[in-house]
Amino acid sequence: MRRKIFIIIGILVVVSLSTLGYVLVNQLSHLGNTTGGRAPDYPYFILTDPIKIKKIVVPKGTKLTYEEHFYKAGQQTRLMNEKKLTRIELPEGKTIDWGGVPVFMIIKFSNPEIPGFSVYPNFKQVSNYKKTKFSQLLETSSCKNEIDFTIKNTDDWSFNGNNITKVLDCGIKLLYYGEDEKHTKQEELYKELKNAK
């Protein structure tokens, strides 16, 4: 009888220590994260073939990231609903031609009340024959790292002047300009965007 009690107590101690160890390791993994928790493991899919998504043709190897989903996390085995797409990230060293601008990533705004997205250019990969007035203006401005656009149709992330309603911002460097100069630069970029083919 005593032996059974010692076995049961031993099992309870092992289970308790295992649980405590798991909780401790889990909490230690959160150290250094300012939010106190881990970032969500957003579902994503790596393309095995080129496809057209959000009216943009993207190459094989592109990472498509989606909104947080209760049942899905991490890498997925197939495409998810395009309406839930939050990010298009091209493979290292690849870009798409977005109005003469070599873009390697597009990210949907996180605020659902503002329909739009940010594009991230890589001007090191621009070809002279593809340059447009819009891309030249963008390259010589403070918008080299990121530019934000509002849009009418959230299903279209292409360089479509009829869908883009406003150039919102040109990254952090534009904050150093006065409001009038900032507004003028945004208007000039928007005008050239509308003229680009």
Image (tube, rainbow, N blue to C red):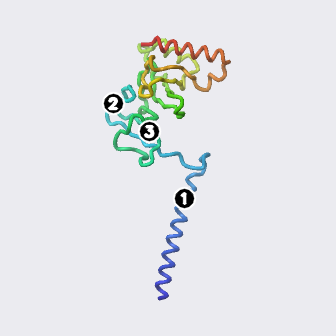
Instruction: Give the residue number, with chain letter if any, for mark 2.
Output: 51
Q: Image point 54% across, 31% down: which residue?
A: 113
- Mark 2 and mark 3: span between their CA atoms? 16 Å
Number of marks in picture: 3
Q: Disc 3 or 1, which lies upstream in sequence?
A: 1
Which of labels 2 and 1 is toward the front? Answer: 2
Instruction: Give the residue number, with chain letter if any, for mark 1.
Output: 25
Task: Pinpoint residue 64: horizontal percent, then vertical percent.
Answer: 41, 36
Residue with the most extreme left position: 49
Above or below — where is 61 with respect to 142?
Answer: below
Which of labels 2 and 3 is toward the front? Answer: 3
- Mark 2 and mark 1: span between their CA atoms? 41 Å
Q: Residues within 10 Å of mark 3 (few under 14, many from 20)?
A: many
Q: Image point 50% across, 77% down: which residue?
A: 10
Instruction: Give the residue number, with chain letter if any, for mark 3.
Output: 66
Secondary structure beneath disc 3? strand
| Kind of residue sitting beneath label 1 | Val
Secondary structure beneath disc 1? helix
Q: 166 left or right of 51? A: right
Above or below — where is 67 with respect to 129?
Answer: below
| Kind of residue sitting beneath label 2 | Ile
Q: Residues within 10 Å of mark 2 (few under 14, many from 20)?
A: some
| Kind of residue sitting beneath label 3 | Tyr
**Tag shown at residue 109:** none
Which of labels 3 and 1 is toward the front? Answer: 3
Secondary structure beneath disc 2? strand
Q: Image point 60% across, 51% down: which residue?
A: 31
Q: Disc 2 or 1, which lies upstream in sequence?
A: 1
Q: Disc 2 or 3, which lies upstream in sequence?
A: 2
Q: Residues within 10 Å of mark 1 (few under 14, many from 20)?
A: few
Q: Quadrant of residue 44?
A: top left
